[in-house]
Image (cartoon, grey):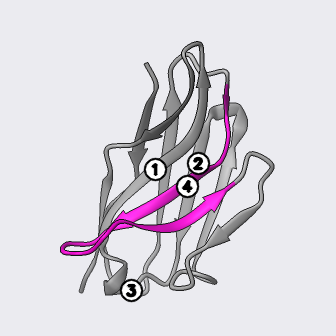
Amino acid sequence: QVQLVESGGGLVQPGGSLRLSCAASGSIFSIGAMGWYRQAPGKERELVARITSGGNSNYADSVKGRFTISRDNAKNTVYLQMNSLKPEDTAVYYCNSPAIATMSGIHNYWGQGTQVTVSS
């Protein structure tokens, strides 16, 4: 059983910073790309940032220059450093990997989500 567990969300003032973490646990052989998505109330879930197993990353235009995705393959963990936060960044942030290999094959997994609220 694979689990993705996010942490690091919370309430922050505009202009502040937060660092999200997502740790994958279970009988994992390998993990491909990992990413962060977010969903604001009344809106569809959207991709925020994605990083390949080799470290190549891409970002939504709305967060370029403010957010940085990174990963520690030895710890099966992906991070999202969020700087210069804006109220429009308020959302539930979800960790995802579409390619986690276990004995049962390669499957897509989601974390449970962590709330990020940017407000004064």
Q: CA distance from mark 4 to mark 2?
A: 8 Å
The relative height of residue 54 versus residue 104 in the rendered view (above or below) is: below
45 or 88, which is in the foreground?
45
Give residue 15's position: percent from left, percent from top. Answer: 43, 86
Q: Which residue in the rendered view is the most extreme toward the top?
A: 103
Q: Are marks 1 and 4 in contact (CB under 8 Å)?
A: yes
The residue that disc 1 covers is 95
Q: Quadrant of the N terminus?
A: top left
Q: Are marks 4 and 2 in contact (CB under 8 Å)?
A: yes
In the picture, the disc for residue 86 is 3
Q: Which span of residues is magenta-colored?
A: 30-51
Q: Quadrant of the C terminus?
A: bottom left
Residue drawn 45% across and 38% down?
Answer: 109
The residue that disc 4 covers is 35
Type of residue at label 4?
A: Gly
Mark 2 or 1 closer to N-term? 2
Residue drawn 38% across and 65% down?
Answer: 38
